[in-house]
Image: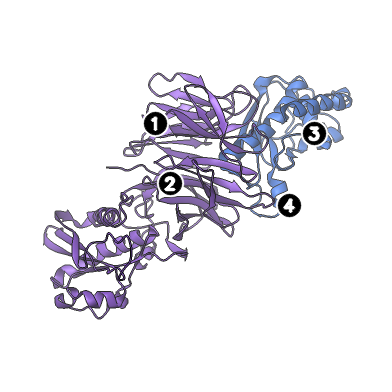
Chain colours: A blue, B purple
Amino acid sequence: MQVRGLRYIALGVVLSLGIVGCSHNSKKGGPGSDGYGASTQGAGDGAGFAGSEEQRDLLAKRKIYFDYDRAELHEHDYQVVNAHAQYLKHHQDRHVRIEGHTDERGSREYNVALGERRARTVANAMISEGVNPNQIATVSFGKEKPETRGHDDESHHLNRRAVIVYED
Amino acid sequence: MKNCFLWVICFCAITFTAQARLNIEISQGTIKGVPIAITPSYSDAQARQYFEEIAQVVRNDLRMSGHFEPLYPEQFHKIASVHDEANEALWREAGAENVVLGVARPIGNNRFTVKFQLSDIYIAPAGQAGNVKSKSGEILVSQTFDGIHHQDFRALAHHISDIIYEKLTGVRGAFSTRIAYVMVVPTMKGTRYSLEVADADGYNPVTLVTSKEPIMSPSWSMDGRRLAFVSFEKNRAEIYLMDVGTGRRELLSQFPGINGAPAWSPDGNTLALVLSKTGSPKIYFLNLMTKELTQITDGYSIDTEPTWTRDGRQLYFTSSRGGKPQIYRLTLATKKVERITFAGNYNARPMLTPDGRYLVMMHREEDNGEFHIASQELATGQVSILTHARLDESPTLSPNGAMVLYGTQDGDRNILGLVTLDGRGQLRLPAREGSVQEPAWSPFLS
């Protein structure tokens, strides 16, 4: 599983090159620090990088979903992870906490381990993009903080996630 | 079951009155327990009412054990005098096989002299082989306790339950023990997590820690005086040690990544725990005296949920090294690792019975999305499924190995279930509000 994850990360690096190219123009934007889900924007700290509208849309996405018992990124999530990576590279004073979560199935501590794998997948993808590891912390809540309390497949899907949280 | 509903009385956060946030409900019983009558004696009219308080607790304990079926007072209404009490035929007619009679005589200053006797009135059917029972009517136990304060009635009742249980089953009773568990209560300000400790029957709950972030994995030290647990209060995983008596706690582990699944060594000197600081979740030992850390397992797989054998020489743990989670055994002296579980495609959260004969774990059958609690006899590999809900988890054993407390679901909330190791006496213990999860049964406390 580890080896396959690395392969995907490498693929992600290749896919992300286009985004890197267009990320130096605007003055506004950047993710807010309110944590989960809300599609907020930063007040703009004047640090130079902010990105295009498309870039801001990607930065507004903070949740990445995973398959059951898996910790690999889906291809369509590389862009999101890389947008955050570029933002962090240009704002070295900002720090993120990447939270790993799982669905309700399985033992609690095993799910902590699984959620940790998800958080690490995202962190490693960012680090391979050149983000300073000191800007990233990972934490796994396992199944302790579900997004939704339902027991169906859709609820399980929504709960299997990594969340990028900007810390102040 | 009347005493199960006392909890409504008091909403105080910390109090030592007889409130209970866990409520006992019988959900099913597969095998009938031994019928036993527990009741105040007519020998002292005033002392009757006081002993009834004790009798209620004892009836509840014995029912909880799954091995007994306490009679309701209506079932022996014909027994209404000291004379009747001595009439074995009347008891037999009521269906009792054992009788406990007691008195609690006030001696002033809210103190009492409590006396009880256990007698056997069962008569084996003629010709039954292997009958080692005493002759009918024999008094098996008779004990007197002097100067008992009224507030200690519950504790004394659990002690009496222990005596009766041991006398009739040959196994030490575990009613004078405690349980730790995690409560999760939704509030206007978000979710409130707390670590609680209560008597084994759910009474006298005390909140040890409250947090807005999750609390996990409480684990008792072998002397029953300390708990290790995981807290996310700083938005990262940390392991704390808490002195249960004083409520003082100490931060023990805060490495980057996972700090989880603490498990005390039998000698109390070492804590096994799971860290992911080098990449994958691995088992480590932390020497509690020197704080020296030693990595115990290695490789890329997930290794977690360590539990010690009684002699401290082996660990059982959950690992993904074979693909799906299964349970493995590590012999510390040789570092040899053997896979232990083969039935089902998911086995995790191992616990061992005190005699080391059985593994109790979370188990999922092939082609079935349900997680049940199962036991595996280590000598034979024989797996028995003990519970039958959809998502049963977090099994913990009573210190005598007879009962398994576990987490299960009831609609959208988590509750505790109780089952005997031989699969009978299903009970449910829901919280008054919110969820209760991750039970941890204490060792014997005396």
- Three-letter amino acid code at disc 2? Leu
- Contact between marks 4 and 3 (CB within 8 A): the answer is no
Q: Name the residue under label 1.
A: B311
Is residue A27 visible to the viewer in this orientation of the structure? no
Q: Nearer the viewer, residue B61 or A165?
A: B61
Q: Where, by quadrant of the figure, is residue B22 drawn?
A: bottom left
Q: Mark 3 points at which residue?
A: A80
Residue A65 screen position, x and y as percent: 74, 41
On screen, residue B405 above or below B80: above
Could you classify mark 4 by the number of other residues whose Cα lies within 10 Å: few (under 14), some (14-19), or many (20 or more)? few
Badge 2 sits on which subunit? B
Q: Where, by quadrant of the figure, is residue B312 drawn?
A: top left
| Cα–Cα span, label 2 and label 1 | 17 Å
Q: Name the residue under label 4.
A: A154
| Marks 4 and 3 belong to one chain | yes
Q: Nearer the viewer, mark 2 or mark 1?
A: 1
Residue A26 screen position, x and y as percent: 84, 27
Could you classify mark 1 by the number of other residues whose Cα lies within 10 Å: few (under 14), some (14-19), or many (20 or more)? few
| Marks 4 and 2 belong to one chain | no
Label 1: which secondary element: loop
Q: Which of marks 2 and 1 is nearer the N terminus?
A: 1
| Marks 1 and 3 belong to one chain | no
| Cα–Cα span, label 4 and label 1 | 46 Å
Q: Mark 2 points at which residue?
A: B397
- Contact between marks 4 and 1 (CB within 8 A): the answer is no
| Cα–Cα span, label 4 and label 2 | 35 Å
Apparent side of residue B115 relative to residue B402 in the rendered image (left or right): left
